[in-house]
Image: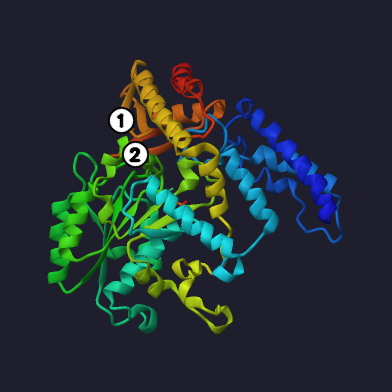
Amino acid sequence: MNHDDLLLWSKRAADWAHEYHATLRDRPVRAPLVPGAVAGQLPRTPPEAAEPMEAIFADFERIALPGMTHWQHPRFFAYFPANAAPASMLAEQLANAIAAQGMIWQTSPAATEIEQVMVDWLRQALDLPPGMVGTIHDSATTATLSAVLTMRERALGWQGNAAGLSGQPRLRLYASAETHSSVDKAARLSGIGQDNLVKIPTDPGLSMRPEALALLIDADRRAGALPAGVILCAGGTSVGAFDRIGDCIAVARAAGVPVHVDAAWAGSAMICPEFRPLWAGIEGADSLVFNPHKWLGAQFDCAVQFVSDPGAQIRTLGLRPAYLATPGEDEITNFNEWTVPLGRRFRALKLWFLIRAYGLDGLRSRIRNHVAWAEQAARDLAALPGVEIVTPPSLSLFTFALSAGCGATEALLARINDDGRLYLTPTRHQGRSVIRVQVGQFDCTAEDVAMIARVVGQLM
Ligand SMILES: *Cc1c(COP(=O)(O)O)cnc(C)c1O
């Protein structure tokens, strides 16, 4: 295949994509396959001879497509969305065509400079303080790991990277049990250790108890340990829990401990001023991550981390070997020094296209609709005899279950997902099996969301 063939095939792919999106509503949302069904159709050994693209494309449709779960299906209510607004898909096509590797400013100045401006556009859209700057990571997991590594180095007086952790005081991190498993992963990968991630008890509103945080930090200090950082949750993955951000930051500040906030999902909603009371006090965070690739509409992957002091993170993650030196490097930003990988895709382009093509107003109205439709869906479900709303809508996420004596909730969920019109996922809340509903797919309509209660009613 050469670039002339690519021209023909990319036109064909564009037609295919248009047809795919136009017919998504008629497909089952979740891949209805058994394990091994896709792999079993592939040859066991790679081809020695070149194959015609016609055959490769046909196998894509025949073998790969039936094994796909349709994340852009308007009735995808599982997990969280991984939205890909059409304008951001277009930007990804262009970034793919150029296929630049933006590891340092010099390797594509536009990639770095557009990233700086897009992060600042988003900072303004979220109403974060002017001093906050940031960068784009692949995922919230990597952003949180970067923040935790920075916490570790700061706590150790910048000695951990050079000397290693053996012989150092015991470091401690604090989070609530509602935070995402990426926080556990960061505790492990940073060498701080899972046993040193203290899960602070929550109050009835599912916020970490700030007074418990204060007591535990104090007890650790008295025992000779080194409190390194607090990770707060603004929109937990299971049921959408929010820590009381301002109160918890005040405790951490008083104790001299930095704070990272995980708003991977809910951060997108904060472009709407009316939702910002949910994270009141956010301006005091040292670090904050949110994923425009979830609710906002930037095609996966795109996780934005804001920091109040980039110097601390650069001191932790940055290296400048001679082969990456750029003349006059004092005035430039090399974003690889802010992140774990060296190589970087041109992710800022899709933010630029997204924000311009829909405007903040267009993005806000989608999110507002999703929240209002989720609230309506919760009311409709609550009106079905035998259905209980277990956790009320947190933005556009709520959970429900069957009441005692009305059948098994897990069996109902299996019937819903086998039916194919909807896709919902399970979680556990306070020991109970529940079904999660989140509304957030970019193209979903009020009618798509209204189908949730209808399908549940039919399948109960
Ligand atoms: C999705 C999610 C994550 C993980 O996001 P990745 O970008 O996939 O690493 C972390 N925290 C929360 C609250 C999430 O919803």
Q: Is residue 47 above or below residue 58?
A: below
Can you see residue 137?
Answer: no
Q: Point out residue 450 in the picture as x, y percentages from the top left corner.
A: 46, 20
Relative side of 221 to 189, left or right: left
- Disc with the residue nearer the chain's start (2 vs 1): 2
User: For this view, does 53 lie left or right of residue 215?
Assistant: right
Q: Residues within 10 Å of mark 1 (few under 14, many from 20)?
A: many
Quadrant of the image occupied by residue 241: top left
Q: Please tell me in which quadrant of the rendered image residue 206 appears.
A: top left
Q: Does residue 339 show up?
A: yes
x, y percentage for residue 392?
A: 30, 30
The amino acid type, in three-letter code, at marker 1 is Val
x%, y% of residue 84? 56, 41
Assess disc 2: are there few (<14), some (14-19) or many (≥20) residues with their C-alpha within 10 Å of its C-alpha: many
Q: Residue 151 vs residue 57: left or right?
A: left
To which residue does mark 2 refer? Answer: 239
Whole-angstrom CA distance, mark 2 to mark 1, is 9 Å
Give the residue pinned by disc 1. 390
The disc labelled 2 sits on which kind of residue?
Val
Q: Quadrant of the N terminus?
A: bottom right
Q: Are marks 2 and 1 in contact (CB under 8 Å)?
A: yes
Confirm or reject: label 1 Cβ below 8 Å from ligand 1: no
Dot label at residue 346: none
Between 173 and 420, the one lying in front of the other is 173
Q: Position of residue 427 (x, y in %)?
A: 39, 39
